[in-house]
C-alpha cells in the first residue's frame, strides 16, 4: 500500500531534492527500508551503527510519535503519511 514519507529539508539532498517520497509498506520499518533502498546515501543519516533510528531523528505517523506506538513495527495503511523530524539543538 502506498505511503508518503515527508523528507525534511536537511535530508532532501539525499533524495534528489524531493520533499516527499512514495513507498509501498505495511509498517513504518518497511517504509524506511523502501526509502533507504531507493536512496542508499540516506541510510547512514537515519540509522546508527546498530541499525536503530538515530536518537536525534523523530518519526511520526500521521502526526503521532511512533515511540508511543510500536516504533518501527507500527502498522501503516494506504494514504498514511510519515514525517521525519530531526531534533534541533542549540543554545547560548
Image (cartoon, rainbow, N blue to C red):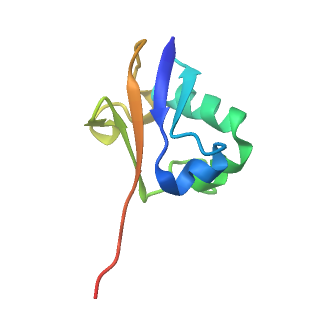
Q: Quadrant of residue 70?
A: top left
Q: Is residue 88 above or below residue 61?
A: below
**Quick one: which residue is furthest to the bottom in this view?**
92
The residue lying at 65 percent from left, 54 percent from top is 44
Q: Is residue 63 visible?
A: yes
Q: Is residue 60 above or below residue 56?
A: above
**Quick one: which residue is furthest to the front in this view?**
17
Q: Is residue 84 above or below residue 28?
A: below
Q: Is residue 48 above or below residue 15?
A: below
Q: Quadrant of the C terminus?
A: bottom left
Question: What is the x, y in percent for residue 18?
Answer: 57, 40
Q: Quadrant of residue 36?
A: top right
The residue lying at 27 percent from left, 35 percent from top is 63
The residue lying at 44 percent from left, 58 percent from top is 55
Query: How many labels were placed on the picture?
Result: 0
Question: What is the x, y in percent for residue 39?
Answer: 69, 40
Q: Is residue 56 left or right of residue 22?
A: left
Question: What is the x, y in percent for residue 23?
Answer: 57, 23
Q: Quadrant of residue 34?
A: top right
Amino acid at each position: 500500500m502506498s505511503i508518503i514519507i515527508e523528507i525534511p529539508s536537511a535530508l532532501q539532498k539525499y533524495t534528489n531534492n524531493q520533499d516527499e517520497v512514495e513507498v509501498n509498506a505495511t509498517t513504518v520499518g518497511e517504509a524506511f527500508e523502501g526509502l533507504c533502498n531507493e536512496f542508499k546515501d540516506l541510510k547512514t543519516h537515519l540509522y546508527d551503527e546498530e541499525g536503530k533510528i538515530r536518537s536525534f531523528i523523530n518519526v511520526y505517523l500521521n502526526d503521532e510519535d511512533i515511540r508511543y506506538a510500536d516504533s518501527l513495527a507500527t502498522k501503516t495503511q494506504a494514504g498514511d503519511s510519515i514525517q521525519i523530524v530531526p531534533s534541533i539543538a542549540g543554545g547560548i
